[in-house]
Amino acid sequence: MASKKQSVKITPFEAVGVVAAQSIGEPGTQMTMRTFHYAGVAEHVPTGLPRLIEIVDAKKEPKKPIIDIYLKKSIAKSSSESEKVAKEISSLYVDDVAKVEDDLEKLYIAVTYNEKDGKAQGVTFAALKKALQDFSENQKVEGHQITIKLGKKKTKTGEKKMTAKAVRKMTQKVRQALVRGVQGIYKAVVLKGDGEYFIRAGGFNIVGACQHPSVDPARVYTNNIKEIEKNYGIEAARNAIVREIKDVMDMQKLFVDIRHIMLIADAMTYSGNIKSIGRHGLSGEKVGVLGRAAFEETIKHLINASAFSEEESLVGVTENIIVGQTVPVGTGRVKLVMKGQKK
């Protein structure tokens, strides 16, 4: 009897790409367009079909990025310690604890510390002052107000007088100055899973999150696949694609063999960077002219091919269907037939 390993082997010349596409595309039509609420993070994170489209289109950033930050074993068991880390990681800006106003005539920015908000967020006036010290050396402190005077700005050629437009731009920068936390990570909440506490937050910044001493850098994960590729490399990004597609399928209670998902992830990452599965990615880079022309932008591909006298060697499935030949997959790949001798 053939072993279990032998029985799951794929037949030679099987059209695995078509089978994978059909295996994911068919359940994909049954997905609801409903978005699902991730526990704790206040936004609706796209799941189902919108999320699947986001993954295969290799979007630079998901619509709602999320980061899961796991803590070191010594801290992960304590709820209060985890809450403390979540507070330290979650980004807090000047605008959250102070009122920022500008005077375009006298060219200054007034930042008034809000004691009530500051105490609630655990930010002192000293911390606010420290966050503003890089904007100008000419700062005046009166009570809970810091006045930043912007008479001149330094340029390569010397000093230049500040304009009202530059003051307004600077005001925006002051509002968005980071007082505490990690840039790009917001609304951090503590959740419990697998007997330990972990932090789930909106946004992404793997490097920033890992710099916190309580964070376990080996277990930081984000649904932003490009961010994973940037920090951990293409192999990790490939695993993230598999995990993300599998999560979408599982959430919709659709069960697809993991090998189909792995084939898609491999096709997207084999070249060393993530490519989408559309006309700007894999489908637009097919070997054959007719194969590319059959999938969107037909005229563009045919004109380019004739302008550069490209050759069509009919290696793909589509090209052979167009010219009416046998498709080179399955039994279509078998060229030799032998007659057995009659005894």
Image: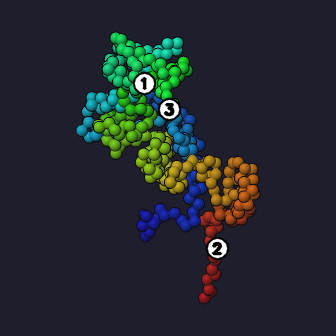
Query: In this rendering, is residue 77 above or below 9?
Result: above
At 54% from the left edge and 44% from the top edge, which residue is drawn?
A: 58
At 35% from the left edge and 24% from the top edge, which residue is drawn?
A: 130
> Does dot 1 land on a helix, a strand or a loop?
loop
At 64% from the left edge and 77% from the top edge, which residue is drawn?
A: 337
Q: Residues within 10 Å of mark 2 (few under 14, many from 20)?
A: few
Query: In this rendering, is residue 22 above or below 326?
Result: above
Query: In this rendering, is residue 14 above or below 283?
Result: below
Mark 3: amino acid: Lys
Return the mark for residue 135.
Answer: 1
Mark 1: amino acid: Phe
At 44% from the left edge and 50% from the top edge, which residue is drawn?
A: 233
* Residue 19 image-quadrant placement: bottom right
Looking at the image, the residue that sits furthest to the front is 158
Q: Which residue is mark 2?
A: 335
* Residue 66 image-quadrant placement: top left
Asked whether residue 137 appears in the rendered view, the answer is: yes
- N-terminal of the pair, mark 1 or mark 3, is 1
Query: In this rendering, is residue 8 above or below 64?
Result: below
Q: Residues within 10 Å of mark 3 (few under 14, many from 20)?
A: few
Q: Which residue is mark 3?
A: 156
Q: Quadrant of the N terminus?
A: bottom left
Name the spot of residue 295 as percent of width and height, x first: 68, 51
Q: Residues within 10 Å of mark 1 (few under 14, many from 20)?
A: some
- N-terminal of the pair, mark 3 or mark 2, is 3
Name the spot of residue 188 as percent of width and height, x first: 38, 30
Q: CA distance from mark 1 to mark 3?
A: 18 Å
Left or right side of 252 for 221: left
Q: Nearer the viewer, mark 1 or mark 3?
A: 3
Q: CA distance from mark 3 to mark 2?
A: 73 Å
- N-terminal of the pair, mark 2 or mark 1, is 1
Mark 2: amino acid: Lys
